[in-house]
Amino acid sequence: MSALLWALIALPLGAGTVLGLGGRRVNAVAPLAATVVAAVTLGLAVAAALARPGVEAPLFTGVRAGLRVDGLSAVMVVTVAAVTTAVLAFSTAEFGRDENRGRFFGVMLLFAGAMLVTVTATTLPLLLMAWELMGATSWALIGYWWRQPHRAGAADTAFLTTRTADLGLYLAAGAAMAGGVGSLRLDALPHAGGAWLHVVSAGVVIAALGKSAQLPFSFWLSRAMEGPSPVSALLHSATMVAAGAYLLLRLHPLLTATDWAGPLVAWTGAVSALALGLVAAAQRDLKQLLAASTSAQLGFMVLAAGSRGVAAGTVQLVAHAAVKSGLFLAAGAWLTVLGTKQLPALSGAARGRPLVGGAFAVGALTLAGLPPLSLWAAKDEVLAAARSESPGLYAVGLAAGAVSAVYSVKALWYVTRPLPAGPAAGHGTGPAVGHGAEQSVGRGTAQRGTGHLARWAHLPLWVLTAAAAVLGVLALPGPADWLRTLLGARGEPSPHPWEAGVSAVLALAAVAATWWWLSRTPRTERAAVPWAQDWLHLERAAHTVLVRPVMGLARALAAFDDRVVDGAVRQLARGGSALSRLAGRVDDGGLDAAVGAVASGARRLGSWARRPQTGLLHQYYAQAVVGFALLTLIVLLVR
């Protein structure tokens, strides 16, 4: 069984590495090879979900690396592999031969492999490794067209924001070690001793909220929309942004071990669902609308995790993965065909391309929470868990559900308008970002959409759409009991019939009111809400509160380094040079002169000593007589 688990993670990681390193040299085979690898991975994921294998290996002294497919990870590995397969199959029509398809498909597989390790890891060190790889590959995918500065900047913003929150996991790991959890097993984290338990909880909560684009980190998801549409369909549906919600669902015992973590997470999710729903409703860019709705829908999962609704959050996660990946692929299809992402310019898009339009309509109605589609049932499960915790949470969640109907029907209203009279009426306007169009943008130019989408590309789109429509069965009494048993979450509250009726009536009322208002209000009179369109000015606030002070401090420290520290070093160097010159002068004018004088005196003495040496005997006798005379005189004087 362990071989099955190793194969599940090794296949996408190994194939992704080969394709990524191959780059353009494997352009011809990369799309098909990546799709086949993803399909085989899906088969392995299904087998692993049924067999539930586990494996451990030594990592550090006293710490082991563990992988296991249990109830929650069984659901996640199948979801991740299925969405990856559908997105990669669709992507084969998105990138032309002049693109670096080997790099794109290779990094996509690497990302999927990292996500599979994330959802199966049983120890914090292995989770951290996969978490880091997931962050690095997401940065590479968002900034795929890195030659354009604004796209590279968007990737940097997304990476640095999530990376800052990710430091919470390192904080949690250190606190767990200090709190006596030497094994760093995820299921042992709630047993950290003393105040360290609160530090572990805080680190995990920060990392999860940042990865899932919850308040106040949400703005990074807006910038991430600069990446290709298939990247958004994979990263921002079932994988990257869902990783934070998964972590909270996985570690719900840690949230309940403290008296503050659960309520904080629940209220953050509820407020994020409502606030980001309003942001989505204010958008005029389709990808921005879908991005904001992603943060809002993830808020329901976070709300469920904080309310001890593990099964409810899991149903919401799985249903949203299918819905949002299908919607992003539909949006990418229109970007391919029409070369625009502005809602007013997409008038008639659904009528002009009925296959894509039908899939988008089903996805939008599901996202709106209309019965009997999946997110209606999933939201009711979440709201039931919220009601058991607090009536306030239930009320905010119910309002967020109504807002989700507003932004969903808004997108649907625009794309189902009557077909425009010609290109001048809206189609083909705006920057091109689709197949051919997106490729041109990637090279720094803009052009209209290609007007063509491969017919077989509709298959993965409709597979996801069908899944989005029917996954609500997981919330029906029989399947819901089975899922709770699978997840070990028996005893979680179920929605009462009146709750399902209230949410359905609110969703229908919101859909009708929004459709009526859009149909009767002239386009020029529709109020713009700058603070909502700009994602609550969160990025501006982050720059004001964090980036500018940090950069200002960095500049001040650089100036201090240049003027004080480096200045002191330079002055010390100048002093050393002056001292060396003085020492040189002392050496040349003093010591060296004294040595020269001694040598000169010795030479003179030697010269004087040579003068008596004439070789004449009578002179030697005369010198001896003089010497004896001097000695005699000295003796006489001394006495």
Image (cartoon, rainbow, N blue to C red):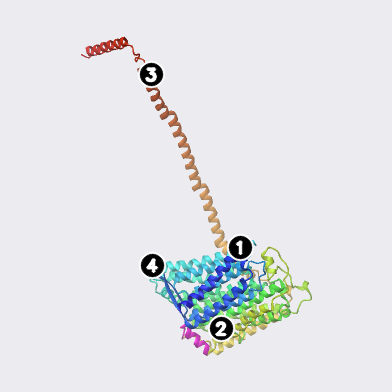
Secondary structure mostly seen in the magenta stretch = helix
Q: Residue at x 52, y 47 (%)?
A: 563
| First-in-chain label (4 vs 3) | 4
Quarter of the image with the C terminus is: top left
Would residue 496 be seen by someone viewing this image from the given angle? yes
Which residue is disc 2 drawn over?
378
| Disc 4 crowd, CA 10 A, few/some/many (<14, 14-19, 20+) | few
| Disc 1 crowd, CA 10 A, few/some/many (<14, 14-19, 20+) | some
In the drawing, what numbered circle is on residue 153?
Answer: 1
Q: State the CA–CA distance, disc 2 to disc 1.
A: 36 Å
Which of labels 3 and 2 is toward the front?
3
Magenta stretch bounds: 478-490
| First-in-chain label (3 vs 1) | 1
| First-in-chain label (4 vs 2) | 4
Q: State the CA–CA distance, disc 4 to disc 3.
A: 83 Å
Q: Amino acid at mark 4?
A: Thr
| First-in-chain label (2 vs 1) | 1
Q: State the CA–CA distance, disc 3 to disc 1.
A: 86 Å
Does residue 379 appear to the left or right of 181 in the view shown?
right
Would residue 258 be seen by someone viewing this image from the given angle? no
Q: State the CA–CA distance, disc 1 to disc 4.
A: 40 Å
The answer to whether 380 is drawn above or below residue 275 in the figure is below
Which of labels 2 and 1 is toward the front?
1
Q: Is residue 483 magenta?
A: yes
Q: State the CA–CA distance, disc 4 to disc 2.
A: 43 Å
Which residue is disc 4 drawn over?
61
Q: Amino acid at mark 1?
A: Gly
Q: Amino acid at mark 2?
A: Ala
Q: State the CA–CA distance, disc 3 to disc 2.
A: 116 Å
The percent coordinates of residue 71 (x first, y second) are: 48, 81
